[in-house]
Image: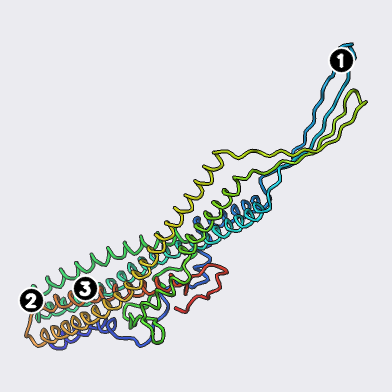
Amino acid sequence: MRGATVRCLTVLACAVSLACGARAQEVPGAVLPPPATVQEVLVQLPQVRAAGAGLALAQARGERLRAGPHDWVAKAGANQRREQGGTRYAETELGLETAMRWPGKVEADRQLGAAVEQVAVLAQADAWHEAARTLLADWFEALRAARTDQLLQAQEALMARTLAATQRRVDLGEAATLELLATQAEHARVKAQAARAAAQAMLVRQSLLRRYPGLPDPASLLPPADAPWPAEVPEGGTDGQDPAAAWVARILEDNHELELAEAQAGQTRLQAERMRLERTPDPTVGVRATRERGGQEHVLGVYVSLPLGSAGRRADAQAALAQADVAQQELARTRQRVEAEAWRVVGEAAQARTTLAQQRQALAYSEKSAALQARAYALGESGLGDWLLAQRGALDARLAAETAALEAQQAQARVLLDAHRIWTPPGHGTPDAEH
């Protein structure tokens, strides 16, 4: 009777462990939300919408630059002329004038307006990408919490069945009360862990769905606790190339942050050139007509005025040139930081794959140990405490392996995101990669 009962316990103890440790040959269902859903969610985020409003602002500023800074000015005046003899005359004067930009300034303003708009376009794309990065991190945090909850709920159910089986053995006189107490203690421990994991998963899920309305429940995309999960995470290298170098090149060749810094540096250079041109003032051209001596005389004329250059204009030009130098150095710093970040992200993905392989190996050893302990307990060669300890070790190894799998998936998804293979902004032109 003891052997049959213990075999039942062994089957119960190993069912979840063996199923979770199975190796899948293909990637299971996607763990990322659908690309269309992600796009709908990101479009509604305040930071992305603010960047869109910034684009409208930049377009208005670009139009203003192309229109120029000068307006037409209308003038009107009235005078009273009185001669010594007492004769009085009413006189009037009308005028119309405007400053005229030099042709070089017109072209410079046109280029500067286009640069302002380009900076806003890239700022919007960069805001989208940063929001997508944050969403990715929050999504996988919720996935990890949900997966931990799944596994601990399954383990709690397993221990509940184990406790029931042990209680039956005690009732039949096949086991000591001490074994029942040990099983009850282990069941209580796992139950407390499961309750905490469930509460944490609920909090993280609620936070995610409040922050990103419209996303599906992350738990709905995870396989059951007894499914063959996780699968291998592909490296994604290119033919004949070092995978890390290939991914870094992909990230750097189309990087919104770097492109934005380059555009901002270009804008400051154009502004410096525009201020240099401003050292030559714009002339003012006008026409005027006067009616003098009560209409006895009419005067029609044109005039040109030209401000003389000053030290202030030279100082403005020098300040703009210094600002352009600052922006150029900022570009170099950004390029260095972006390149280092690309190597870090790719390196973390490779390290995550290595860690996943190591955790899977540890899981295999732990499961084998738990199975051997179960067999030893069935044969009376070890006590229930040893078997429960082995089960605890297998659970810890399984949780570590599942966490490593999701971290590897997240690291790979981050590489794909930075390389613009997934979750690209509307109109970017690169379709979302299958995942």
Rounded to the nearest angstrom, the CA distance separating label 1 from label 3 is 111 Å
Instruction: Judge depth for marks 2 and 1 and give the one in front.
Output: 1
Mark 2 and 1 residues: CB-CB less than 8 Å, in contact?
Answer: no
- Front-most of 89 and 150? 89
Q: Amino acid at mark 3?
A: Asp
Q: Nearer the viewer, residue 215 or 187?
A: 215
Q: CA distance from mark 2 to mark 1?
A: 134 Å
Secondary structure, mark 3, is helix
Q: Position of residue 315 (x, y in %)?
A: 52, 42
Q: Is residue 113 left or right of residue 38?
A: right
Say which element carries label 2.
loop
Residue positioned 53% across, 43% down in the render: 316
Q: Residues within 10 Å of mark 2 (few under 14, many from 20)?
A: few
The picture quadrant where one finds residue 138 is bottom left
Q: Using a 10 Å C-alpha cutoff, classify the residue at mark 3 as few (fewer than 14 neighbours), some (14 to 19) or many (20 or more).
A: some
* Spot occupied by residue 313 in the image (x, y as percentages of width and height): 56, 42
On the question of residue 425 being in view, the answer is yes
**Amino acid at dot 2:** Ala
Q: How is the image coloured?
A: rainbow
Residue farthest to the right, as pictured: 296
Q: Which mark is residue 281?
A: none
Counting residues from the start of the chain, the first of labels 1 and 3 encountered is: 1
Which residue occupies 12% across, 70% down? 181
Residue that mark 3 sits on: 396
**Which x, y percent locates residue 358?**
23, 79
Q: Amino acid at mark 1?
A: Glu
Q: Which of disc 2 and disc 3 is earlier in sequence? A: 2
Q: Would you identify the image quadrant in which residue 396 lies?
A: bottom left
Residue at 13 percent of width and 88 percent of height: 3
Splitting the image into 4 quarters, where does residue 250 fall?
bottom left
Q: Which residue is mark 2?
A: 176
Residue position for label 1 = 83
